[in-house]
Amino acid sequence: MKKKFPLLFAAACLLWVLSSWRTPSDKKGEIPANAFGRLPVIANGRVQPLDSLARNSLLQIREKQTVATAPGQSGSKTMSAAQWLLEVFFQQDMADTRPVFRIVHTEVKGLLALPLDPVPEKGMDGKHFSWNQMSPKLPDLMEEARRAQGVKQELHTPYDRALLQLWNAVSLYRRLQCTVQARESKNWEREFQEFIDAVPAGREAAKNQQAGQPLDPKDTAALEKLISMLQRASEQQSLTPPLIVPPTQPGTGPEGWTRTDEALFRIARGDTVPGSLRAYASMGTAYRNADPAAFGAAVERYREQLAPLGYSMLTKGEREQVFNHLEPFYKATVLYVLAGLCVLVFTLAPGRLEWLRETGRLLTLTTLLVHSAGLVYRMVLEGRPPVTNLYSSAVFIGWGACILGLLLERFWKNGIGILVSSSAGFLTLIIAHNLAQSGDTMEMMRAVLDTNFWLATHVVVVTLGYSATFVAGLLAVLYVVLGVFTKSLNPDKAKSLVKMVYGIICFAALFSFIGTVLGGIWADQSWGRFWGWDAKENGALMIVLWNALFLHARWGGLARERGLMALAIGGNIITAWSWFGVNMLGIGLHSYGFMSAAFTWLMLFVVSQLALIGFAALPKRFWRSNEAAA
């Protein structure tokens, strides 16, 4: 049984992942929220399904992709992201009662006059609040948010950061509310039809008014209705909601999409009424009437209207919805933990528990397959190479580290490679998960990144250099921890770790150097200079120089076993600074903004690595492994 267990367990984990391949079908008698979630929309500069818009919005507002109707109560129900977006679009009075705004800072709660502690009998957990609970104090929130926006990011207090995070959530919620219809509209389909009917007479009345001719009372009423609707639309323009009105001509692309308010102004000028607005208006009526059949029919009619614009647009929505439901990176995170646990238990009795090492190896291979499938799926969806922003860089670095760890395990077969793969994969996917809470993970970071060739060469190669340097540093950390705190670091294992680190650093030096040179060529083509001493360019150069320092120290005999490991741990600091630190400086073409949470974790990471370097420098008599050897 022990011989078959590794394969059976890995197969069971793979089946668990594949069980989410098909999105759940809409239940009969309920509003088809999944069908609605497949409809395309333009948000964050790309085509995406409404399901992705809903999930990404909830992550920013609530830090979760679902909504609890009464958090803190035993009878609370859970709404999917698409179901919540339906309410926000078509039944705003109900959406305003949902506790979706996450507020944990005490001073912010005090500003909004919210309860500080949970109130279970009212369905309040003390952390999530509704629009209706906040709306009386929104003017105060706006005033405080404007004050905080005038303060430099690096000078923000925790109160300022909590304020701005909540204000961004409020702004996003308001944008979603006016995506389809004007806020507080009770019957958008009727109001929209009345507006369309009033356009001819209103336009005629406007012409007569400009010419100084008398106005007919009916024309005057039509003109007033026209002006009233356009005023409501103009109030929404500053919010810049997502684009839901597709172009009428095939082949126009994402550039031809418009917002609802823009479409209303075009209708007032005499343009054709977009079928998408009529479809969404019909969906809204059917939703409020709780009529699943009528809602589903409206969705299908709209899909038929979209068909001439391009088959890929519809299929992209379906495929991205499958990807959202599959959650390959979340499942890979779980599997990395299981693989790591198998290896940790294996180290307790390597002889008798060899089957656990094999289980961890097969499970890591399975996880790599899931991780790779997620990467490839994202690439196919967006037609981009694997690294386009910070989120995807974290996913890719974990993927590269997993491969390197498995290669180490292929040669040494002692569980260390599996531990490196599982640890690096888990940590980088956790970083990616936290980065995902800032918004759309498939959004491009910079306009200059809109170059697939350099994304597929410079960015991928230099990121592989990051992965290798981190793997070498992780092996060195393992060396120090085993040597200082345990008795398990025998001379053979120590030599194996040193050889592993040396081989990985050679790989890292090659790829970081080539990636940096390719980045210089890209910079020359994009900005007209090969090297501009940009912060990110200097960070990349620091990695190359640090890896070169390690190699020269080994070849020249300047550092021995422990010294080389200390240098490899130092590489973790250099690489983390190049990856995240320079992005927060606020200078250069690669600066993406100061992130206080990321800065705090970066500093904690640096301190931990410096502490490990200090442990590596301790005399051997203080190492527990040295006691065992003696």
Image (cartoon, rainbow, N blue to C red):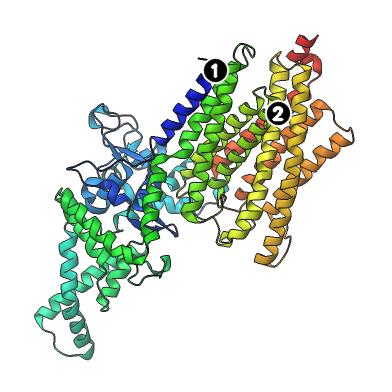
Callout 1 environment at 10 Å: few (<14), some (14 to 19), or many (20+)?
few
Quadrant assignment, res 483: top right
Viewport quadrant of the C terminus: top right
Q: Residue at x 45, y 60 (%)?
A: 45
Q: Label 2, on which residue?
A: 411
Q: Secondary structure at mark 2?
A: helix
Q: Residue at x 22, y 73 (%)?
A: 227
Q: Of callouts 1 and 2, which one flags the residue occurring earlier in the amino acid sequence?
A: 1
Q: Amino acid at mark 1?
A: Lys
Residue 210, position in %: x, y? 23, 87
Is residue 131 visible in the rendered image? The answer is: no
CA distance for labels 1 and 2: 21 Å
Q: Amino acid at mark 2?
A: Phe
**Height in image: 310 above or below 15?**
below
Is residue 460 visible in the rendered image? The answer is: yes
Residue placed most toward the observer, 46 or 611? 46
Q: Secondary structure at mark 1?
A: loop
**Height in image: 209 above or below 193?**
below
Quadrant assignment, res 562: top right
Residue placed most toward the observer, 183 or 484? 484
Q: Disc number at residue 3?
A: 1
Q: Residue at x 30, y 66 (%)?
A: 261
Q: Disc number at residue 77?
A: none
